[in-house]
Image: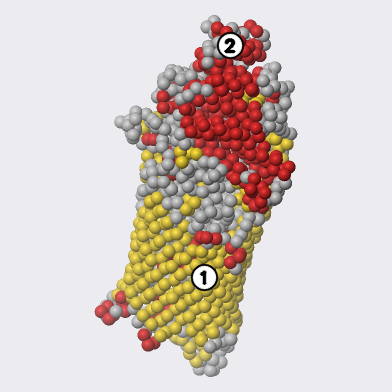
Amino acid sequence: CQKDLELQPEDNRQTAESAFQDPQAYRQFLAKLYAGFAVSGQDGPAGNPDLTGLDEGFSQYMRLYWMMEELPTEEAVIGWNDGTIKDLHNQNWTSGNEFIRTMYSRIMYQIAQANEFLRQTSPDKLDSRGVDSSLQAEIKTYRAEARFLRALSYWHALDLFGNPPFVTEEDAPGAYLPEQISSAELFDYIESELLAIEGDLKDPMANEYGRADKGAAWMLLANLYLNSEKYNGTDHYADVITYTTKVIDAGYSLVDDYQKLFLADNNTNGAQKEIIFPITYDGINTQSYGGMTFIIHAAVGGEMDPDNFGINGGWAGLRTTSALVNKFLDDNDNSIEEVDDERAMFFTEGQTKEINDISNFNDGYAVTKYKNVDSMGNAGSDPTGDFPDTDFPMFRLGDTYLMYAEAILRTNGDKTKAVTYINKLRERAYGDDSANITASDLTLDFILAERARELYWEAHRRTDLIRFDQFSNHGVWPWKGGVPQGSTTEAFRDLMPIPASDLGVNTNLEQNPGY
Amino acid sequence: GTVTESATGLPIPGVNVIVKGTSNGASTDFDGNYTLENVTNGDILVFSFLGFKTEEIPYQGQSTLDVTLDENQATLDEVVLIGYGSTSEQNATGAVEKISPEQFNQGAVVSPQELIAGKSAGVQITPPGGAPGEGGTIRIRGGASLSGSNDPLIVVDGVPLDQRGVSGSRNALNAINPNEIEDFVILKDAAATSIYGSRASNGVILITTKSGKKDSPFQFTYDVKASVGNITDKVNVLSADEFRNIIESTPGTNPDLLGDTSTDWQDQIYQTSVGAIHNFTATQGIGNFYYRANFNHTQQTGVLKGDYYQRDAINLSLNQDLFDNQLKLSLTSKNSLDQNHFADRGAIGSAVAFDPTQPIYDPESPFGGYFEFTRQTNGGITQQNLATRNPVALLNQYTDVNQVRRSITNLNAELKMPFLPELKAVVNGGFDYAEAHGHTFRPLASAANTSNINQFSNYVNYNRNLLLDTYLNYNSEIAAINTEIDATAGHSYQEFFRFSDSYGTEQDQEVDFPVSIDRNALESYFGRVSLDINDKYLISGSIRADGSSRVAPQNRWGYFPAASVGWKLQNEDFLKDVSWLSQLKLRGGYGETGNYEIGANYGYLGIYTPSVGGASYQFGDQFVPTLRPEEYDENLKWESLRNYNAGIDFGFFDNRLSGSVDAYYRETKDLISVVPVPAGANLSDQLLTNVGTAVSRGIEVALSGDIARSEDFNWSLNYNITFQDKEITKLSLGDNPNFFIPQGGISGGVGNTIQLWKKGYDPYTFFVFRQVYDQNGKPIEGAYVDVNGDNQITEADRQPYKKATPDYFMGLTNTLNYKNFNLNFTFRGSFGNYIYNNTESANGFVEAGTNTPSDYYSNLNSNVLDTGFQNSQFFSDYYIRGADFVKLDNVSLGYTVPGEKVDFKISLTASNVLTITDYEGLDPEVFGGIDNNFYPRSRRFVLGLNFTF
């Protein structure tokens, strides 16, 4: 009977060797690496989660990354009672915070998946499976994309946690204790990876929609360089200029209407020419309770009509503070309705500008930036109104312009082009050149505020505030520090804590200072 | 004639009287009388009764033949099954307990677990909620595992059942008709269980069903039990007026959203449940062939409207003894058809939360005429998506039915070797097959259906479990050394196969869901040798080797040894003459067992799973389905348990007072647990792996006293008490003392938990903030003890506090017979256990009702009037409540009318009669200790009638 004990799966689960009999499996595995940013598991919208340490919808990558970048800043508050969720805005999180923990798990999950992809697609493995040369050539591009996605997650790890555990395709899955890497070394690693794969990636806009190309890698490099002082104490602003220039010269263009960037058809309405790297969603095929589903539903509540957002109901959670609203108001303006800046997308009816009670949706203006309707106002493809089609713009040309301008300012370079680029954004926002700036207006303070106006709720703010040293011990906005008027917090909060749960199992790790 | 007991002169009812070699026979009635016709001179009359020496008396024409029977010490010392063989109670060296029908709980018992609740020390049976046909949770010595199964292995007539249960069934044991159970044998310590190797860590329960008797007359019994039940309490929520008050006095609310009626939603969803259990049984022994056949029809409605359970079952037991009893064949077959209607239990939570000012019906409503919270859209009126749903509509606009067919059948052949009668060979082949077909439906008209089509699913599950055991048993007396030897060695193979397939809707599409297939196999060798030296010293040793398909080849085989000794002190010369001492035995044992229910069939293999549903990713114009590698641990193996047990069995005054005391210490190693894996080291955040250890210890005391033993009056009390303690001693790969794993999900928020696993604590320990109270003892909202002194309250201030498991629990059974009356009752108590009142914490603060995602309000738990909490305080220890309780589980009064041709018994039983507790929630007895939308247990009254022809 003993051979009866050698049992293999008999349903749709497969061992690696049988799965990769099918040449399509490589493409499907690559799709998993991308989908890891968009959905939460193998059964959309939910049912077979990637991570089990937290509710499936909550553990979704984009949702958590968005929360990490937005909730601790002036751009967003959330009113729910889920565990320690309010600690994120209060900036009093600890190493036990389950959202921080799951973000960390999610990032390391993506890295581990990419490592497995690289192991399964090594030239030796492909040869041993008899993969033909044309597929091998395609897989070479896949491998470059897998390394890009791994670098992207490592950048998130670097930016959020500083000194995360470090694993590559050399480390086979097990229950061993990964070594910790210093942020300076991780910076070098990410940089070297991106430089190494540049040649294997497709040219800008030459890849299939949704997949990474050289433009995406350049944007990631530019982000890495822009924030490098926080990572390794050296500045790389010249490199920022180099790589943002490459992007700007690559043929991307601003979409005519700012709102189109955040609509259900932003993969076809012209916004796709501005978006350098999206995380894609689809109401039928790419469903999750995280990502855009969260960002759109959670922002709707109070007297907002869900129909206007192409959804079946709001979750009444997310709003913003007056500190963001005020960035659109000049001294003479008393109300946000009078602002001509198209980017000021707030819902004010029944909402108070100041927040008295974070739990109450009516406290604080709501944000109407993201919608599951197309440019014609039609709702997205999911007839139940649960899951949006709207893609998340992770990197877009508008950001590139602002990054370029900031690097010029920080290197005292020639502002001419920078001013032109900024004015392109402002002309789009105001519909004319009435709000254009001149070279003298272009200061670092202006950049920080303009980044808020242009890029709020796009998951950049925490990183921006830290780069401008306004995140923790400087900078105040409502409810920062857990008090209505806001207070500063300690500087160590520029880094998130290594989760206590991982410190508990991995004795190679050292906690970040202050926690 | 009359049959009496030689020692006491009392009549013995139920004695079989049969003419040897024929089927002509009778049995004695309640007064020991019997009548037998057609007897001719020279016939031999055989008088037999369990526990007495069989008498054979030649018939010589007497018209009256009175007989006295002697107690048979050997058979009084009952035979106890111990797995692949048997022993006697006298000779058992492990912690083994047999529970027979006279001790069973009375009443309209549908599931076998209920029969033995409170009957055995160390065995905690938490009754299920009030749903019909559900089974309780059994924990023997608290269970050994964390993430793995803690359910005992259940072996029915020699067939070990799949510990994962039967998909689609309310209770995997329902295939066994309680009426047909001969006895339960509970194996508690490893000396007793390790013969079941890798499945034995949580104890083993051997269930034997009734069979016919050799040479017995035809007997037919009809038994019926009719019951009615009602809930005993409701969750305290605000009345319509109180609710209106709170909404109107809360700033920022819009009282226009309230209705103008007054509805007690809980009254609307509960009903009086009714049930009936019919049993028709025929038994007969025709020479060497004997049988028992039973047909059972059970139906039971739930207290929640729409819940229904029905069972139609046929149990057959056929025995044939051949070749002068050299070969014994027995076939047992349990066949059942369960029909279930599952009510939507979401109604329980909805009824607690639904706005009491709203009406049940609304003539304008597009949702089948039920009032629902709606909103106006471009396309017309639609439901508010996240609003509470009308509980009555939830019950009435949902269909969830299934049918489960099941057969547990086995053929057992026992052959005494002609050349060596002390040696017998046993072959036991069997299967357990179950097939469930189910259907759910929620029409478009239901507000709970947010899609644009009728929602349905059709599913089918097959579970199959095949068994083949072969073993040899040698039992002989070696006179030279005055030793009795009993040796067994054998082989077992068992394969488990599970299949499920479903087709149904997801959002607006019909989807053919992928088939799921799971197969695993277990191959085993086992052996046991028991020696009884000089009728004083007992030595027993056993070993089992298990090979499992669930474990990687390098770890595949596990070895589970056990050894135990016993000393029958009463047979020693120095105690032989102590007349008041009937029994005194010391026992001690050590054994190792495993836990094979590790949760995954292919946990050691790296597996790839394709995506289904909307989990594809867009590449260009295509949506590419994805392929995910799963986390795995190639070294995964079973948990192993080391178990030490010491016990004493005693009996005094002709066993009028008897009992046993057991003490145990158990250590689980390689604890299977889903634990956080070091980030990056594997392909998920948590991994099923062998990590950690747990220790449990306990003392179990069982006492049995016969207060009265006389002709008309017999009264006995059985009492047991268990002290137990379980503690996690290691939980992670690292050694950080602060490491913990959150457990115990609660309602309120998403992803919130209230318990933890942590080194040094019980696995059901709560994890809370320490509430601060004002001088009136009222909790101050948001004020907690700053445990770490950092001047802020963060989750670092949450502390382990109290636990859901009891420190000790007990059971008391009363059996009283006076003439033709009997009175039985059972008390059960549990002490030192705490409960988290989630019904209060989830709805007991103002914003739970007012701060809703859209235009509606939710009702509040009345506790809000005590606390005045505005915001959620989920993690406050205020909600951790003492849950000590004593329950009068059942009281039964019966009367027997002996008749000429028909014996008639009538009984009245009340179950779940009385609960004595300080806990203010619905019921202090909730498995796991989190009281949230608990399905209330009903108090039931049962009328039982029994006719024997």
Q: Which chain carries label 1?
A: B
Residue A93 lies, in percent from the top left, at 43, 30
Quarter of the rendering containing residue A388: top right
Q: Which residue lies furthest to the left in this view?
A: B574
Mark 1, other Cα within 10 Å: few <14 / some 14–19 / many ≥20: many
Screen quadrant of the C terminus of chain A: top left
1 or 2: mark nearer the eye = 2
Residue B148 lies, in percent from the top left, at 49, 54
Q: What residue type is labelled 2?
A: Lys
Q: Can residue B475 be seen in this view?
A: yes
Look at 70% across and 28% down and name the residue there.
A205
Say which mark, if any, is on residue A415. Answer: 2
Look at 41% across and 46% down and name the residue there.
B734
Q: In this view, does B147 lie above or below A456?
A: below
Q: Is mark 2 on a helix, strand or loop?
A: loop
Residue A473 lies, in percent from the top left, at 41, 21
Q: What residue type is labelled 1?
A: Tyr
Residue A81 lies, in percent from the top left, at 49, 32
Query: Which residue is more in the foreground, B189 or B118?
Result: B189
Say which mark, if any, is on residue B525. Answer: 1
